[in-house]
Image (cartoon, rainbow, N blue to C red):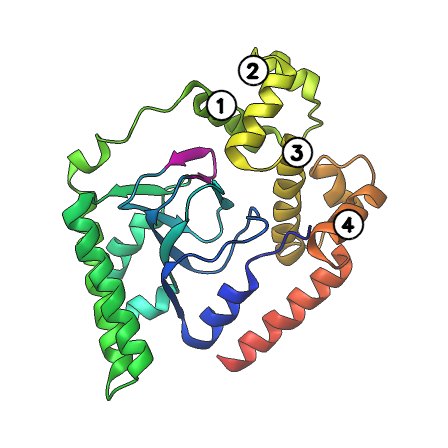
Amino acid sequence: MKYNAHFPTNKALKQERIYIRHQVSEWQDSWPLHTHDGFEIYFFLAGNVHFIIGNEIYPLQPGDMLLISGDVLHQPNPAKDVPYIRSYINFTADYIQEMAGDELQSKLLNLFDHPNGLLIRWGESGMNEVAGHFTAMLSEREKEGIGYEFMMQSLMVQLLLKIYRKSKDVYSHLTAPAQSQKETNVRRILKYLNQHYRTSISLEDLSETMHLNKYYMCHCFKEITGISINNYVTRKRIDEAKKLLRLSDEPVGILSEHLGFSTPIHFSRMFKQYAGISPLTYRKTAAEHSIKDRGRE
């Protein structure tokens, strides 16, 4: 399975700077750990899902909203036995700035600064209000009446203001359900992996560090996240490799060593397996896109 930034989202953000879906129920064969451009408002409506953001695991209930910075690895892991229904909006910073101005934009985007995401719990009445906001935005988008772009931006800023005010209500953070022992264990494992993914991590050593039986540990992690521990570590390393390939000129061999791969050949093979192209091709393509983007400014 390839691991990539979420290209449909990125493509939509480059074209329109906002990407909105409401009451989505489509099922996927896999739910990959991923990143994307911009920011995301994820609104859970129905189903049974664990949502992983950074070191945190969120067992969600209807009406829960997650605020996510797109550059943080995140992934839903929904159960198959019930319909999985959700809404989400992805948007860029400048889309908000045009309507809100610099000062208000800064306050609103602070909501997305949490490294493990931010949970907002709306409850039944708030859930209906937020769902209505999604419906109004989609209606403007689909009808494309006079001034619909202005209306959509206005509604988007209004939604963020509602979320900002809600986030100041301390009680919205006091009603989260207690995590099960499995969820607590996986949260500990995620925190450790995110801190030590650059080093060699064996399941035996991890089991000893976590004080957990190896087989129980692996079973819990796969059940909660939907992927294996080794798969998670590799995806984390590949995601970091992409950032380094875009932002630095370090040779691939040095990068592979920094990221905990046994050899540059192993790194290149795993990178191509998950990203679909070699590290050098990825770096060249990213540089070309950067030049094109600067040319359009």
Q: Are marks 2 and 4 in contact (CB under 8 Å)?
A: no
Label annotation for residue 120: none
Q: Which residue is mark 2?
A: 210
Q: CA distance from mark 4 to mark 1?
A: 31 Å
Q: Secondary structure at mark 3?
A: loop
Q: Which residues are magenta?
A: 49-59
Q: CA distance from mark 1 to mark 2?
A: 8 Å
Image location (x, y in percent) of residue 42: 36, 52
Q: Which residue is mark 3?
A: 198
Which of disc 3 and disc 4 is earlier in sequence? 3
Q: CA distance from mark 2 to mark 4?
A: 32 Å
Q: CA distance from mark 3 to mark 1?
A: 17 Å
Looking at the image, which is closer to me, 23 or 176? 23
Which of disc 2 and disc 1 is earlier in sequence? 1
Residue 102 in view in this figure: no
Q: Are marks 4 and 3 in contact (CB under 8 Å)?
A: no
Image location (x, y in percent) of residue 6: 55, 59
Q: Which residue is mark 1?
A: 188
**In this rendering, the label closer to the viewer, 4 or 1:** 1
Q: Secondary structure at mark 1?
A: helix
